[in-house]
Image (tube, helix red, strand yellow):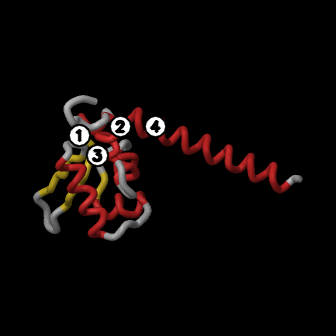
Amino acid sequence: MTGGQKCAVESTVDVIGGKWKPMIIYRLLDGPRRFGELRRLVGDPSQRSLTMQLRDLEADGIVAREVFAEVPPRVEYSLTPFGQTLTPVLMAMRDWGIAFQEQRLATKGQSTSR
């Protein structure tokens, strides 16, 4: 880190950090999703909150928004090629989360058996 430049981890957290962004990206790993589907899959954030998070991710080049010329209009969100480079990051987070949950269960089991 030189000349006032941010730490690389800080830059990553700036882009994918927050309550909903990691879950949005994770759910888009499987392919394009419509707004309502994405909202249900990530934990039912408010419409405003999800819209803001998607706009941020779009502005950062992580998510693409495609509007289809249909009545009513259909909008789908997908990861950009650059957004897809986050796959190993999200998979590592998922794997760590699984290990953490298992460790917590094992620790709770030990404390209740005493």
Amino acid, disc 1: Thr
The mark nearer the N terminus, 4 or 1, is 1
Alpha carbon distance from label 2 to label 4: 17 Å
Q: Which residue is mark 1?
A: 80
Amino acid, disc 4: Met
Alpha carbon distance from label 2 to label 1: 21 Å
Alpha carbon distance from label 4 to label 3: 17 Å
Q: Which residue is mark 3?
A: 15
- Which quarter of the rendered picture does the N terminus lie within? top left
Amino acid, disc 2: Val
Q: Which residue is mark 2?
A: 9
The mark nearer the N terminus, 3 or 2, is 2
The mark nearer the N terminus, 1 or 3, is 3
Please, what secondary structure does the residue beneath circle 3 have? helix
Please, what secondary structure does the residue beneath circle 4 have? helix
Which of the pair 7/57 is nearer the observer?
7
Q: Nearer the viewer, mark 2 or mark 4?
A: 2
How crowded is the residue under tag 2: few (<14 C-alpha within 10 Å), some, or many (20+)?
Answer: few
The mark nearer the N terminus, 2 or 1, is 2
How crowded is the residue under tag 3: few (<14 C-alpha within 10 Å), some, or many (20+)?
Answer: some
Please, what secondary structure does the residue beneath circle 1 have? loop
Q: Quadrant of residue 34?
A: bottom left
Alpha carbon distance from label 1 to label 3: 14 Å
How crowded is the residue under tag 4: few (<14 C-alpha within 10 Å), some, or many (20+)?
Answer: few
Look at the picture and state if 60 lies above or below 40: above
Q: Which residue is mark 4?
A: 91
Amino acid, disc 3: Val
